[in-house]
Image (spheres, rainbow, N blue to C red):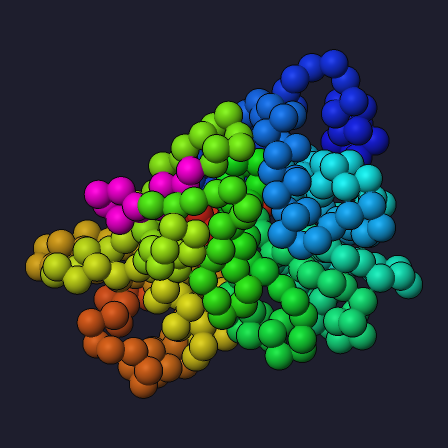
Amino acid sequence: MTYAEFEKEWAGEGAFVKARTSGSTGTPKDVLLRKDDMLASAKATNAYFGIDSASVLAIPLSCDYIAGKMMAVRAYAAGCRLFVIAPKNIFDIGCGSIDLLSVVPTQVDCLLNHPDWVGRIGAVIVGGAPLDQGRREALARMGYNAYMSYGMTETCSHIALARIGEPYEAMPGVTFEVDGRGCLVANIPAMTIGRVVTNDIVELIDSRIFRWMGRYDNVINSGGIKIFPERLEEEIARYVDATFYIVGIPDEKWGQAVQMVVEGDENMRGMIEGALKSHLDHKFLPKSIRFVGMIDRTSNGKIKRLPVD
């Protein structure tokens, strides 16, 4: 869908907009979102960043997904300019200043290759998939005012944002609690969805701030020790320069064991095993390391966590 097509849909008489989920936690599907909910979400983000009619928003993302649609709605809500950029990993922001830019992790390298953009971009939202620790730290070192987003298509994009190295903070009007599993529950009174129970285990700091630990359905229980793959991946990424993920596999003795799936070949094994043994507690060492030519991903680039035989 082009932005012109979305603008036509938005201006139409219908009360809903069709959006497609990413498929990161299941099969991708189309969902109907209320325009009123999208507008409420847009106004909350605009308030958070101080976006008004004089602002410039920029988006190098497809309008097929919620991130692209919501940048258009934010521009509409503020009555400001939306600078539409071709959805490519290598893009150009032009010669002017931008108040808010939204990107996905595969586009972050473009920002890192342009230190001259730091003073021209007010804030950057990175969403769609987790961003590795190395790139997070690189963005911070360069001085980008970058935020990681937390949300889903059903909540009309993010309901919380986190500056690099800081916990997530709720959007205006949103509050949080946790359920019996330790998973996040979001209260969103400004939207008809009202309340969302997630499968994300968090450390709740207060009703508006949390630290994300990992997905409930990804947790590895090995001999009574709960291992969060996402956290372990962040730690390993400090020492291993490779594309990989962590997943649990059945283990007769411990119930589950850690498996590391690496995009590459056996020639990398010695380097990886040496780095892991030097830096990880033995309780978190992978029982097996499997190499694959290409890691399976969803249509928007999120890794599919599948054990490898």
Residue 16: give x, y in percent of width and height: 63, 20
Residue 41: give x, y in percent of width and height: 60, 38
- Residue 232: image quadrant is bottom left
- Residue 81: image quadrant is top right
Q: Is residue 93 left or right of residue 213?
A: right
Q: Nearer the viewer, residue 54 or 6?
A: 54
Q: Main secondary structure of the magenta part?
A: strand
Seen as rendered, the residue at the extreme left is 253
Residue 285 sits above or below residue 107 on the image: below
At x 66%, y 32%, the residue is: 39
Q: Is residue 159 left or right of residue 185?
A: right
Q: Is residue 89 left or right of residue 234?
A: right
Seen as rendered, the residue at the extreme right is 95
**Is residue 84 visible to the viewer in this orientation of the structure?**
no
Q: What residue range appears in magenta?
A: 178-187
**Is residue 289 visible to the viewer in this orientation of the structure?**
yes
Residue 132 sits above or below residue 2 on the image: below
| Quarter containing the N terminus | top right
Residue 248: give x, y in percent of width and height: 27, 55
- Magenta stretch encompasses residue 297: no
Residue 301: give x, y in percent of width and height: 56, 49
At x 8%, y 59%, the residue is: 253
- Residue 145: image quadrant is bottom right
Q: How many marks?
A: 0
At x 49%, y 70%, the residue is: 165
Q: Is residue 27 left or right of residue 287?
A: right
Seen as rendered, the residue at the extreme bottom is 278
- Magenta stretch encompasses residue 185: yes
